[in-house]
Image (tube, rainbow, N blue to C red):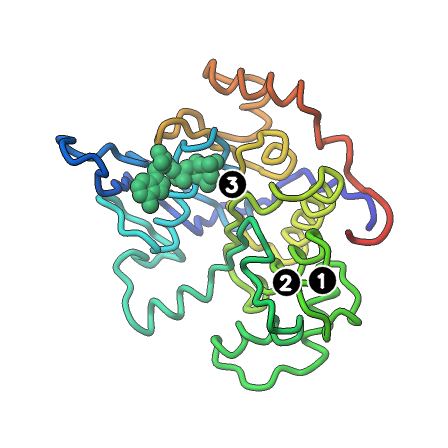
């Protein structure tokens, strides 16, 4: 893979996603609890088309809860979400199915998210069926693999025969099959070695510049998020405590918590210097 220095976000101002006052409460597990604590509370932000938003925060800060609410996997207690100018939380039936296809999802563990029985060609074909297409042409599958830096010879292979990084590339290719407007990635590189992690981050930046897909990238690791995102959102105890352009937050964090995260990052190593690793995808 070649060196990537694509730091300047595209000049676009169109809002793809707007979240207003989103809160989620899980049912209380304590019998005598007066009422449940909100897992996320009053979350508001917007994402411009073509931008990458990084969400960072310690374990339990509510990152996955926010993503699950955005994907409508759990119902929010309050809030409004506008996606592609539509009232996303109110969509039903065919309109919902159509809008869902505009969002691709990549999760942490590709070996759990990719079916072990299917080969890569079948895995990449599946979203096309859901999108109403019948038999995809081989060229489409081959270019989907090429777009994530994998050789076309991988098409007949099973996911279980791939490395973690290769399998995550397949998961990214699958998420992009329907050319979504938004890619949501929850800890998508957290299970990978640092060098492989850097390759995947470079790939995501390449993909964004090639396709202009917007991304929400969640990680507990500030080094990872910082490397990739145009805008950064720091979450703590279910709330946004800091939000703005990544460079601004990194150079001048307003919260002591963000400063502490930055200091942890400095001691645990920095992915920023590992861009453009040569060689085969791992
Ligand atoms: N299904 C659930 N039922 C009850 N409480 C939950 C449930 N899922 C998460 N929580 C609680 O909600 C809070 C936020 O959890 P969440 O998984 O969103 O955090 P996170 O930031 O994604 O953490 P991590 O970095 O570990 O993935 C935590 O206190 C968690 O215990
Ligand atoms: Mg999580």
Mark 1 vs ligand 2: CB under 8 Å? no
Give the percent coordinates (x, y) of residue 194.
72, 37
Image x and y of residue 56, in percent: 50, 33
Extreme residue in the top direction: 256
Q: Residue at x 27, y 48 (%)?
A: 80
Residue at x 24%, y 32% (from the top left corner) = 37
Q: Earlier in the sequence, mark 1 or mark 3?
A: 1
Residue 125 occupies which quadrant of the picture?
bottom right
Pair 2/1: label in front: 2
Question: Would you call the spot at circle 3 few (<14 residues within 10 Å), some (14-19), or many (20 or more)?
Answer: many
Q: Which residue is mark 2?
A: 173
Q: Position of residue 121 (x, y in %)?
A: 66, 75
Q: Which residue is mark 1?
A: 147
Q: Nearer the viewer, residue 52 or 49?
A: 52
**Residue at which label 3 appears:** 218
Q: Is residue 115 visible?
A: yes
């Amino acid at each position: 893979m070649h060196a990537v220095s694509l730091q300047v976000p595209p000049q676009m101002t169109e809002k793809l996603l707007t979240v207003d006052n989103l809160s989620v409460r899980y049912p209380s597990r304590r019998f005598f609890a007066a009422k449940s604590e909100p897992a996320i509370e009053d979350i508001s932000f917007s994402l411009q088309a073509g931008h990458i938003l990084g969400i960072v925060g310690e374990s339990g800060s509510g990152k996955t809860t926010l993503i699950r609410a955005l994907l409508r996997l759990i119902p929010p207690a309050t809030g409004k979400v506008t996606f592609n100018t539509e009232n996303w939380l109110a969509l039903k039936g065919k309109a919902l199915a159509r809008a869902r296809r505009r969002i691709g999802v990549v999760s942490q563990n590709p070996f759990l998210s990719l079916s072990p029985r299917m080969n890569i060609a079948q895995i990449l074909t599946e979203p096309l069926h859901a999108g109403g297409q019948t038999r995809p042409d081989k060229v489409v599958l081959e270019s989907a693999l090429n777009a994530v830096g994998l050789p076309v010879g991988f098409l007949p292979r099973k996911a279980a025969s791939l490395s973690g990084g290769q399998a995550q590339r397949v998961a990214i290719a699958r998420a992009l099959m329907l050319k979504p407007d938004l890619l949501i990635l929850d800890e998508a590189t957290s299970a990978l070695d640092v060098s492989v992690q850097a390759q995947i981050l470079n790939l995501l930046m390449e993909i964004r510049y090639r396709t202009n897909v917007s991304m929400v990238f969640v990680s507990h690791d500030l080094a990872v998020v910082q490397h990739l995102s145009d805008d950064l959102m720091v979450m703590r105890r279910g709330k946004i405590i800091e939000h703005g352009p990544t460079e601004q937050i990194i150079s001048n964090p307003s919260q002591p918590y963000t400063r502490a995260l930055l200091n942890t990052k400095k001691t645990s190593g920095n992915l920023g210097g590992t861009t453009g690793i040569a060689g085969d995808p791992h």
